[in-house]
Image (tube, rainbow, N blue to C red):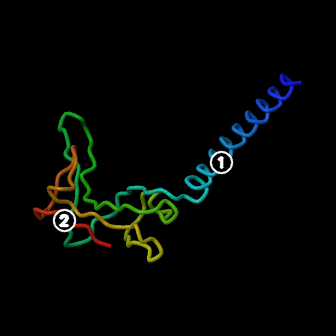
Amino acid sequence: MNTTLNRALSVGLTVFLVAFILFDIWSRFSGYVQAKDFLVDINIPCAQGSSCFTAVCDPSAGSCDTSEYLKAELTAEYVPQCAFEHTCTEFSCPAADRSCHIISCSTDTVQDGEKCENAPQAATVTK
């Protein structure tokens, strides 16, 4: 009788743990993929008068896109369709996305393979 009870408890505990793990995976999937509750970085057209990023090109590499751009960090839910199609001509942070900000180029924000055009010395982050 004791063996049967132990086996039943073991099976019940295993079923509970598997169900809990599956629920956890589903809730994370739902939060990140379905609700698009994560931050993304996109490149947006450079606004006139802004300190913009541009690519550092290797002359031996052939063609290189040296167009100027700013960076924006925003919640995936609010990324405009034109960002996926690389056709945005203007961009501003959506009022509903409180985490959105536009990043201008500076010595603090430039990364490898980039350079600044008209850069200030300190980082510029705007809402």
Disc number for residue 88: none
Mark 2 and mark 1: Cα distance apart in space: 42 Å
For mark 2, give the secondary structure: loop
**Relative to 100, 123 lies left or right:** left
Q: Position of residue 117 (x, y in %)?
A: 15, 60
**Relative to 4, 43 lies left or right:** left
Figure check: 24 above or below 107: above
Figure check: 60 above or below 27: above
Mark 2 or mark 1, whichever is nearer to me:
1
Q: Residue at x 19, y 33 (%)?
A: 60
Which of marks 1 and 2 precedes in the sequence? 1
Q: Residue at x 34, y 67 (%)?
A: 101
The residue type indicated by label 1 comes to: Trp
Figure check: 18 above or below 97: above
The residue lying toward the viewer, choosing from 54 and 110, is 110
**Relative to 8, 117 lies left or right:** left
Residue at the outermost left position? 121
Residue denoted by label 1:
26
Residue denoted by label 2:
51
Residue at the outermost top position? 3
The residue lying toward the viewer, choosing from 7 and 110, is 7
Q: Position of residue 122 (x, y in %)?
A: 14, 63
The residue type indicated by label 2 comes to: Ser
